[in-house]
Structures are given as structure tokens and as C-alpha cells.
């Protein structure tokens, strides 16, 4: 005990005792945590009530994998589409570069053409980085293109080490370190993607491996980044949960026990158990500067952490958007729908066509009185999406009045109230539709036709209809 070093932590202003050394545990048989991951049962979340402290970094940011992991799960984007999306990401991230980096494949000529065109934009952010196979030929390609950083796959669970690569921990660790050294020899900063970290032996393999990576960083004076990849979405953010499923436990181990600086640490999540967003936020809270995301969560299987979600997580945690232009999210959603042909599910937060649309009459009544009652924030200001009411059998008078006011942009004295006779006439028509067996919502064109008919029959001029 007396030989262990005491040092001062400038982040939390506490004296801390240096942790003990974590040697590689070169097991003879794989540890696949069968107690947590019985394949013929639902995975289990276990607790040991070991709590680690919050450790939010001074600076946090988003990195983008839309053109890498996002592109693995769909029809490849064209070069022009990639460049357009990259332009949007630059605008969305703002002058402070909250969207710090975007990673690209380099395998095909199309991929490389897109990289060249994006780099020609001259943007500081997002920085163009790559994802390559771990070979000297690919390292040289990265250097020739002019990139400063590349991602390298270093799978870290025994599922991969023993079953996929038919190797041992010691052998694979030496192989990985040799590959990383080759990358550093070319002057390129390696970003080590620790695949399947939420099923790995954190202190028997991951921490010893990362300690060796930090030694290489010190030797070459080139940053070695660590991306903690929750490949199967097993991560949980519950206080006191056991590793390897505990997100905060993993981040603590990497940052404190493996000495990975926060600025070199990022989280890459998947949404298999609906936890991608909360797990990414947890990684920020416990010491990772970066969270890796894709637009609209498009990615392998259930997808990655949605980038637009983390934009608003950032704003909620920091109390500011820090220059990000969130209206670009709507521009991107429209671009994906119209130009790329990708259908965004209608109830997708921030981007789906119905995310701020209400159908319930009682909600519409509240919106008519004050939209703050049933809208998450000023969606027109932040997303160019005014709160809407879809007219159906449950909309009531208030819903129809709100639809008229929103559709025509009526403000102040021009607003139509729910006791307006035109509203009553339209509601009577709507009720008749559903009495006769209709099950779909009323379309905009149908409502416009009924409003015009009601105005003519009642000889009322609302000042909104023109021929």
C-alpha cells in the first residue's frame, strides 16, 4: 500500500491513490459471461452496487458514422449525396464544431471520390477521417489522401478472439499492437474500435490492452484514440450494474484504470435494446468526450445512436446549443425523404412527420389555448416545424380550429376560435365521415375543400381562402 503513488486530480480536486497494475489474463478457455448472456434466454442485467463518480469532461462532442456504419446497412449513397449530407453536417455542427469528425470508407473509387470532394470543401469541422482494414497498404492510402486519423477494428470480446479469429488473448493483443505500431510509423493517429466491448473481459483484456496502447501513444507522441463499441447494444446505464454491461463502469475503467484521456475516448452504441441514446449520454457523463452517431440512427440491425438525438442531449446537458443550427435536421430529413428515398418512420423524434402532431381532441384544446402545454419546445424555432393537429374523429372543435390557425399561420385577432360556426360546420362533416365507417385521418385537401364550402354556405369570410 505505501508504495502506491498518490496524485492530485485537477478535475475533481481530490487526492487519489494510484490503482494497481492490470496484467493480461491469458485464459485458456473463453469467458463469454454465460451467466449474463445465456443464449437460450433473455440477457440478464446484474448488479453489484459498485458506484463510480460522474466525470463529465470540460468539452464534449459528437462524431459521425453516417458514411461508414450507417452506409453498411443500406444502399450506398452516391458521391453527390455524400457531399450534400456532409455540407449539412457542417452547418448543423456550427462554428464550434460540435460535430467534430465524420468517418468514411476508402475501399472503392466512389468512396475515395467522396472523400476528396468533402476535403476540398476546406471545412475544419467535421474533420474527414477513415475506417480501413488493418494493413500497411491501407495505412499508406490514408497518408497519401492526407488524413490525420483512421479507425482500426480491434475486436475485444472472447466471442471474437476465440470463436471468430480462432486465437488467444495474448496472440491477438500482440497482433493488434503490431498493427497499431504500423499505423503510428506512418504518422497516422489510430482510432482503435474495441468491437463488442459490452461482452468483453474489461480488466482481464481490455484494460491491459489499452494500457499498452497508451504506452505506444507516449512513445510516438501521436494520439491513440479508443472507441468503445457496444456492438450488440448490451450496455446499460443503471447505477450499480456489473461490467461488462455497465456503461459507466466501462468508461471508468478505460479512463481511470487504463489512463485513456477523455479527449481520446468515445462511445459507439447500437439500439438493440432501445438504449443507444441513454447509453451515449451516460458515456459523456462519466468521462468520454465523444459519442459516435449516425443520422436518423441508420446503421447495422437496429441502428446506431441517432445523431440528431445527441444534438438535443448536448443542449440539455450544457444549457446551450453552442452554435449548432438545429433547423438543418429538418432540411436533412426532407433531403433523405425526397432525394434519397429513405423513409423516416413518422413517429421518429425531431424528424418524423408526426413527431409534434397531435390527434387527441383534449390535447388540441390545450394547444389552442397555449401550445406549450403539449409541445416539447418551440419546434418552429428549432426545427422549422410548427406544432400540428391531425384531424380525425377525436380532434373535436379545438383540433379543427388549431389546424386552421396553423395551416394558414393565423396570429392574434385573426386566429379562429373553436366556437366559430365554420369550425362547427367542418366538424359536422368530419363526424359524418367517421359515422359512415372511415378509419383514416382527414387529408389537408379535404379540409380545405370543406372550409371553403362552409364559408360559402355561411357567407363568412375568414380572410384565408383565395381562388
Image (tube, rainbow, N blue to C red):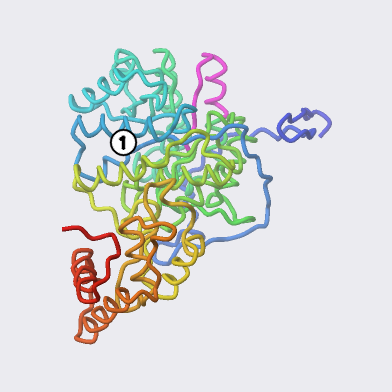
Q: Secondary structure at mark 1?
A: loop
Name, please, the residue furthest toward the left. Answer: 467
Q: Is residue 396 above or below residue 259?
A: below
Pick the front one: 332 or 269: 332
The image shows residue 82 at horizontal and vertical percentages of 25, 32
x%, y% of residue 118?
29, 23
Q: Quick check: 53 above or below 427?
A: above
Image quarter in which the N terminus is found: top right
Q: Give the image quarter of residue 81.
A: top left
Question: Residue furthest toward the bottom?
Answer: 435
Residue 101 % position (x, y): 41, 29
Q: Residue furthest right?
A: 2
Left or right relative to 81: residue 386: right
Q: Give above or below for 199 relative to 55.
A: below
Residue 81 part of the magenta-drawn span: no
> Which residue ends up furthest to the front in the rendered image?
459
Q: Quadrant of residue 8?
A: top right
Please state, as top left, top right, bottom left or bottom right, where the C terminus lies in the image: bottom left
Q: Nearer the viewer, residue 302 or 31?
A: 302
The range drawn in magenta is: 211-227
Q: Badge 1, how many Cα within 10 Å: few under 14, some, many 20+? A: some
Q: Which residue is mark 1?
A: 68
Q: Decide if residue 203 is in sight here.
A: no
Q: Is residue 114 left or right of residue 128?
A: left
In terms of depth relative to the viewer, which is nearer, 123 or 427? 427
Residue 340 picture quarter? top left
Locate residue 277, reporting x and y percent: 47, 50
Q: Residue at x 31, y 52 (%)?
A: 301
**132 lies above or below 282:** above
Amino acid at each position: 500500500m505505501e508504495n502506491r503513488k498518490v496524485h492530485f486530480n485537477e478535475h475533481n480536486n481530490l487526492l487519489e491513490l494510484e490503482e494497481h497494475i492490470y496484467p493480461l489474463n491469458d485464459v485458456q478457455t473463453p469467458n463469454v459471461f454465460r451467466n449474463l448472456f445465456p443464449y437460450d434466454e433473455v440477457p440478464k442485467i446484474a448488479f453489484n452496487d459498485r458506484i463510480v463518480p460522474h466525470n463529465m469532461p470540460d468539452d464534449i462532442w459528437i462524431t459521425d458514422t453516417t458514411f461508414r456504419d450507417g452506409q453498411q446497412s443500406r444502399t450506398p449513397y452516391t458521391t453527390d449525396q455524400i457531399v450534400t449530407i456532409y455540407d449539412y453536417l457542417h452547418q448543423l455542427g456550427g462554428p464550434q464544431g460540435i460535430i467534430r469528425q465524420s468517418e468514411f470508407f476508402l475501399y472503392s473509387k466512389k468512396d475515395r471520390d467522396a472523400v476528396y470532394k468533402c476535403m476540398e470543401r476546406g471545412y475544419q469541422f467535421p474533420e474527414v477521417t477513415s475506417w480501413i482494414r488493418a494493413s500497411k497498404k491501407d495505412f499508406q492510402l490514408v497518408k497519401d489522401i492526407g488524413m490525420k486519423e483512421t479507425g482500426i477494428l480491434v475486436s475485444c470480446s472472447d466471442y471474437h478472439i476465440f470463436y471468430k479469429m480462432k486465437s488467444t488473448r495474448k496472440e491477438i493483443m500482440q497482433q493488434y499492437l503490431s498493427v497499431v505500431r504500423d499505423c503510428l510509423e506512418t504518422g497516422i493517429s489510430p482510432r482503435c474500435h474495441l468491437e463488442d466491448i459490452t461482452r468483453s473481459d474489461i480488466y482481464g483484456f481490455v484494460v491491459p490492452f489499452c494500457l499498452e496502447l497508451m504506452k505506444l501513444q507516449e512513445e510516438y507522441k501521436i494520439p491513440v484514440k479508443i472507441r468503445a463499441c457496444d456492438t450488440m447494444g448490451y450496455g446499460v446505464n443503471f447505477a450499480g450494474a456489473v461490467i461488462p454491461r455497465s456503461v459507466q463502469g466501462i468508461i471508468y475503467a478505460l479512463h481511470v484504470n487504463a489512463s485513456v484521456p477523455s479527449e481520446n475516448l468515445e462511445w459507439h452504441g447500437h439500439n438493440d435494446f432501445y438504449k443507444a441514446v441513454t447509453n451515449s449520454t451516460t458515456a459523456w457523463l462519466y468521462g468520454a468526450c465523444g459519442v459516435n452517431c449516425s443520422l436518423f440512427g441508420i446503421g447495422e440491425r437496429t441502428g446506431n445512436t441517432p445523431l440528431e438525438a445527441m444534438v438535443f442531449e448536448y443542449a440539455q446537458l450544457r444549457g446551450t446549443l453552442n452554435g449548432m443550427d438545429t433547423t438543418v435536421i429538418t432540411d436533412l430529413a426532407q433531403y433523405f425523404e425526397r432525394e434519397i428515398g429513405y423513409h423516416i418512420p413518422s413517429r421518429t423524434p425531431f424528424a418524423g412527420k408526426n413527431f409534434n402532431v397531435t390527434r387527441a381532441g383534449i390535447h388540441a384544446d390545450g394547444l389552442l389555448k397555449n401550445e406549450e402545454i403539449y409541445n416539447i419546445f418551440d419546434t418552429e424555432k428549432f426545427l422549422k416545424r410548427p406544432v400540428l393537429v391531425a384531424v380525425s374523429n377525436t380532434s373535436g372543435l379545438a383540433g379543427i380550429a388549431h389546424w386552421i390557425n396553423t395551416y394558414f399561420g393565423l396570429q392574434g385577432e385573426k386566429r379562429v376560435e373553436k366556437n366559430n360556426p365554420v369550425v362547427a360546420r367542418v366538424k359536422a362533416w368530419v363526424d359524418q365521415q367517421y359515422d359512415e365507417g372511415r378509419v383514416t385521418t382527414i387529408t389537408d385537401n379535404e379540409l380545405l375543400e370543406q372550409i371553403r364550402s362552409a364559408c360559402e354556405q355561411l357567407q363568412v369570410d375568414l380572410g384565408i381562402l383565395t381562388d
